[in-house]
């Protein structure tokens, strides 16, 4: 089995560090990728990262992961609340995945309280800032033989 984790960051996460820093902090997407990669390396995994503002690109990356990844860490951004096809892609590849949200979505607008992924994710990490990605990696690694 592969010792690789796919890191997926959805729409607008390329703006981390500058977009609403009072909500998301000042860490950048590069920081998220470094934090995730470091946590994974400590557990013997490597990380392949993808970020896109386009749903189809994310779905293609998830489909490709079934060939060489052991798990997926995903922050779907706003697609959390809207995308049935993202859910279908994640369940379709049969890899354990962690749903990560930097902010506490339950302390925000009501529409953010619904997730199409929460009942199928192996791990959920909400409101722990960018350190939540490392937590997700550790939790997923514990599920992989």
Image (cartoon, rainbow, N blue to C red):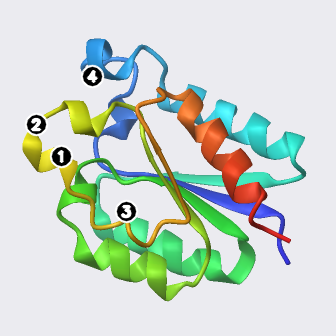
Quarter location, residue 89: bottom left
96 to the left or right of 89: right
How many residues crowd mark 1 within 10 Å: few (<14), some (14–19), many (20+)?
some
How many residues crowd mark 4 within 10 Å: few (<14), some (14–19), many (20+)?
some
Q: Position of residue 10 (x, y in %)?
A: 36, 51
How many residues crowd mark 2 within 10 Å: few (<14), some (14–19), many (20+)?
few
Q: Which residue carries the number 1 mark?
A: 112
55 to the left or right of 72: left
Q: CA distance from mark 2 to mark 4?
A: 17 Å
Using the image, determine if residue 2 lies above or below residue 48: below
Q: CA distance from mark 1 to mark 2?
A: 6 Å
How many residues crowd mark 3 within 10 Å: few (<14), some (14–19), many (20+)?
some
Q: Secondary structure at mark 4?
A: loop
Q: Secondary structure at mark 2?
A: loop
Give the camera-side residue of 18 and 137. Answer: 137
Q: Which residue carries the number 3 mark?
A: 118
Toward the left, the furthest residue is 110
């Amino acid at each position: 089995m592969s010792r690789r984790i796919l890191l997926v960051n959805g729409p607008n996460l390329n703006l981390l560090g500058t977009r609403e820093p009072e909500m998301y902090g000042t860490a950048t997407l590069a920081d998220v990728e470094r934090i995730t990669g470091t946590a994974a390396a400590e557990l013997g995994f490597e990380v392949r990262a993808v970020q896109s503002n386009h749903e189809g690109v994310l779905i293609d990356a998830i489909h490709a992961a079934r060939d060489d990844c052991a798990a997926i860490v995903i922050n779907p951004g706003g697609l959390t609340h809207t995308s049935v096809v993202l859910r279908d892609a994640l369940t379709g590849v049969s890899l354990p995945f962690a749903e990560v949200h930097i902010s506490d979505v339950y302390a925000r607008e009501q529409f953010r309280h619904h997730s199409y992924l929460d009942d199928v994710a192996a791990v959920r990490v909400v409101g722990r800032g960018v350190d939540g990605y490392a937590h997700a990696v550790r939790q997923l690694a514990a599920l992989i033989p």
